[in-house]
Amino acid sequence: MKTRPAGIGSSRADWMGSLSPELTAMPLKYLAVPGSHDSFTFWVDVQAPVGPDQKAFVKYLATIFRHMAKKVMVKWSMTQNLTFKEQLDAGIRYFDLRVSSKPSEPGREIYFIHGLFGHKVRDGLSDINSFLDKHRKEVVFLDFNHHYAMEAEHHAYLISMLQEVFGSKLCRASSVEAITLDFLWERKYQVIVFYHHMSAKGCPVMWPGNKIPAPWANTTKPNKLIQFLETTLQERSEQGSFHVSQAILTPKVNTVAKGLVWGLRNYLVERNLPAIMTWVEAQKPGAGGVNIITSDFVELTDFANTVIKLNNLLLSDERDRSRAA
């Protein structure tokens, strides 16, 4: 499949700030927003132990085959090539974040995790904050949806870290319907954090996980994925939440076995991207439509730009209503 650049460094870095007033006044739950799946997997540490998110037999194989097993894991754990900054420059505004402590390491340090450990969470958050400092009208969704090997003190440390890094940029949890770009800009909010754990209950700047459902198809078949995406959009709640459409395929054990040396990108993603992108291009945001759409390897197609342009359909509807009135 031919690859097309995602427009890194282009106007996509400021796409939210460039939207028309009609769109910035709409609830964000109605806008089309591009996101990345397992957003932090652009680098993983092959020297560290296998992560606690893996099944016992994977840890066993990694112990027996060591470097060879980890080389295979890298090929199947990495779902992105772009760094946080590159994703942000390309227009990505939703980040799917899975985190863990290192059980063998003293202290409370938290790392990104997907089979293998990634960067320290603090480093990733600092990169995102640096981007936001330069792009004051851009807003990001940070979805901390999986936590591994984390005790109460780890959660407290991470929640404190989020407040320390982002400070007044953090949006207080409130009615989803009230969250428009105009609302956020007026208050200088740029970060909406979703924290899927009871430890964050009572913290005013941590949104509960049920405010951002992300149904998972768990299939290797593009036709089943598309059917699932359609069904879950029809079932999307009318009130009280954002919505993530995970336009991703998930390898099974036999998928990995068949494509052992190829990896996720070459064996599963690239060959099925045309069908998935055809579905994305046919979508419409707004009530009952798409909101956040996530993808693997967001640079392989013009994914972010394709999702962003869906918002023009809302603009057309708004102008048609104005003319009719």
Image (tube, rainbow, N blue to C red):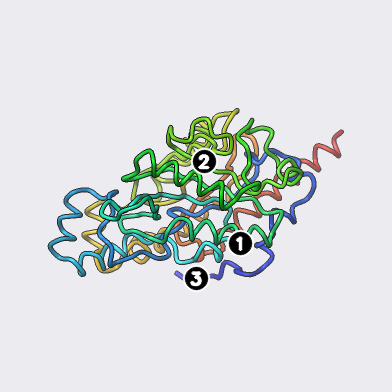
Seen at 42% across and 42% down, the residue is 155
Q: Is mark 3 on a helix, strand or loop?
A: loop
Q: Is mark 2 on a helix, strand or loop?
A: strand
Q: Which of marks 1 and 2 is nearer the N terminus?
A: 1
* Viewer-side label of 1, 2: 1
* Viewer-side label of 1, 3: 1
Q: Where is residue 206 in the image (x, y as percent from the top left)?
A: 54, 38
Q: Is 17 drawn above or below residue 287 in the view shown?
A: below
Q: Position of residue 100 (x, y in %)?
A: 36, 50
Q: Position of residue 58 (x, y in %)?
A: 20, 54
In the picture, measured across the screen, residue 254 lies left or right of residue 78, that is: left
Q: Residues within 10 Å of mark 2 (few under 14, many from 20)?
A: many
Mark 2 and mark 3 residues within 8 Å of each other at the beta carbon: no
- In this view, the residue in front, 71 or 320, is 71
Q: At label 2, which amino acid type do we have?
A: Phe
In the rendered structure, find residue 194 and report the number of the disc placed on it: 2
Q: How crowded is mark 3: few (under 14 residues within 10 Å), some or many (20 or more)?
A: few
Q: Look at mark 1 in the image and give the residue it sits on.
A: 130
Seen at 69% across and 33% down, the residue is 178
Q: Position of residue 209 (x, y in %)?
A: 48, 36
Q: How far apart are marks 2 and 3 (CA)?
A: 32 Å
Q: Is 78 drawn above or below residue 158 in the view shown?
A: below
